[in-house]
């Protein structure tokens, strides 16, 4: 029995062709024609006034976004609690302190009402955060109609962690364009992969130039090596950008396939489990997530899947329950904790065959009784 994975890379002849062309033409460097073209094509995907900067990872993008928002030692940064650790860790890289905000049960994204409470409390105490990082969880764009104005009201920059949301939209607007800066990830299990990589979406040419500079060791544009600031080695390799260009061409098809897998799960399992609530049709369907009525049921299904060589995973363990962030301030409402205990991510990769999806459905149907 072949093993079924959660979200393996979906790459083929086109990626191979682009990669080998870059290799054969000698562009084996963190710069080159494929990096430039990838940035242009990514910007075009996300709409007007978007300037993409290709980077070595999404984590690197969040780090630079925080630094450019002025985050430094002693600052506080609000961040979604229900997310992957990479959303919060860059706050610590800056010497700042995270404050976790729990999820809205209607979207699983940052709760606008909790953000409102936390901002009002911080303002009263004269301890407003230097930035707010809002995550687009499992590819679903967060409720920026409510989150954005709250950040504006208190004059706090909003960073969109759209690592999982490449290709998603909300009311027709592209993920990654809702904050002062947005960040994508192209890690191996993401919807569009370069094996490892990421990008940052800046809102002006000048901002993008500044990010390019910081990501290239903050080298001054002179012939010798001159530096007036500490920089980073955060640029994406041209070889990987070539893979990214092929993936970008195939993105609409990959999203379509993930959506059809999601629809198959809904149709077959809709009576036995509940699904992540969707607020907009523009979701990229990165991962199909289901919630069981009890933890025991969830665990039984996961065991059955594992026994049939099918990978599945509990939903993200909230940051406020992580040992590394013990004692950190958190505005909790129980949502992410409940989802962590009752939820499961199902195999959702665009390379899955219909027969494989059927195998997952059969195993779940048999074990959920
Ligand atoms: C994957 C991910 C990241 C980190 O991206 P990398 O490219 O792996 O560094 C950040 N935030 C979220 C929500 C992610 O899922």
Image (tube, rainbow, N blue to C red):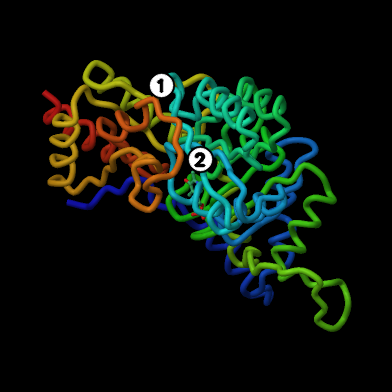
Give the alpha-carbon distance from disc 1 to disc 2, as whole Å. Answer: 19 Å
- Callout 2: helix, strand or loop? strand
The one nearer the camera, 201 or 16, is 201
Please tell me in which quadrant of the rendered image residue 289 appears: top left
> How far from the left and from the top, in percent, is residue 150?
65, 24
Please tell me in which quadrant of the rendered image residue 20 appears: bottom right
The residue drawn where x is 66% and y is 56% is 54
Mark identifier at residue 99: 2
Q: How many marks?
A: 2
Quarter of the image with the C terminus is top left
The residue drawn where x is 62% and y is 37% is 127
Identify the mark nearer the N-term, 1 or 2. 2
* Residue bearing mark 1: 105
> How far from the left and from the top, in percent, is residue 115?
55, 27
Q: Residues within 10 Å of mark 1 (few under 14, many from 20)?
A: some
- Callout 1: helix, strand or loop? loop
The one nearer the camera, 89 or 220, is 89
The residue drawn where x is 33% and y is 26% is 264
> How far from the left and from the top, in percent, is residue 181?
69, 42
């Amino acid at each position: 029995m072949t093993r079924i994975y959660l979200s393996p890379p979906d790459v083929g002849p086109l990626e191979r062709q682009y990669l080998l062309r870059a290799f054969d033409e000698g562009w084996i460097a963190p710069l080159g024609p494929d990096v430039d073209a990838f940035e242009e094509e990514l910007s075009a995907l996300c709409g007007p006034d978007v300037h993409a900067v290709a980077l070595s990872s999404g984590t690197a993008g969040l780090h630079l976004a925080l630094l450019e928002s002025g985050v430094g030692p002693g600052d506080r940064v609000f961040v979604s609690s229900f997310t992957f650790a990479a959303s919060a860790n860059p706050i610590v890289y800056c010497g700042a302190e995270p404050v976790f905000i729990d999820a809205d049960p209607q979207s699983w994204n940052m709760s606008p009402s909790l953000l409102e409470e936390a901002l009002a409390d911080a303002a009263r105490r004269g301890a407003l955060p230097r930035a707010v990082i809002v995550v687009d969880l499992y590819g679903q764009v967060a409720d920026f109609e409510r989150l954005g104005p709250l950040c504006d009201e208190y004059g706090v920059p909003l960073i969109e962690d759209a690592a999982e949301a490449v290709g998603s939209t909300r009311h027709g607007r592209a993920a990654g364009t809702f904050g002062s800066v947005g960040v994508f990830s192209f890690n191996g299990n993401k919807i569009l992969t370069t094996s490892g990589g990421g990008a940052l979406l800046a809102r002006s040419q000048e901002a993008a130039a500044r990010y390019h500079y910081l990501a290239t060791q903050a080298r001054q544009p002179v012939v010798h090596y001159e530096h007036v600031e500490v920089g980073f080695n955060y640029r994406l390799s041209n070889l990987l950008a070539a893979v990214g260009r092929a993936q970008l061409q195939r993105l609409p098809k990959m999203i379509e396939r993930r959506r059809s897998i999601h629809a198959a799960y809904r149709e077959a399992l809709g009576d036995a489990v509940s699904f992540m609530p969707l607020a907009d049709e523009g979701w990229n369907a990165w991962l199909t997530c289901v919630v069981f009525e009890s933890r025991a049921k969830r665990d039984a299904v996961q065991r059955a899947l594992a026994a049939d060589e099918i990978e599945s995973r509990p939903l993200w363990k909230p940051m406020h329950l992580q040992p590394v962030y013990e004692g950190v301030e958190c505005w909790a409402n129980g949502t992410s904790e409940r989802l962590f205990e009752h939820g499961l991510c199902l195999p959702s990769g665009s390379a899955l065959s219909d027969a494989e999806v059927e195998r997952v459905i059969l195993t779940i149907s048999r074990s959920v009784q």
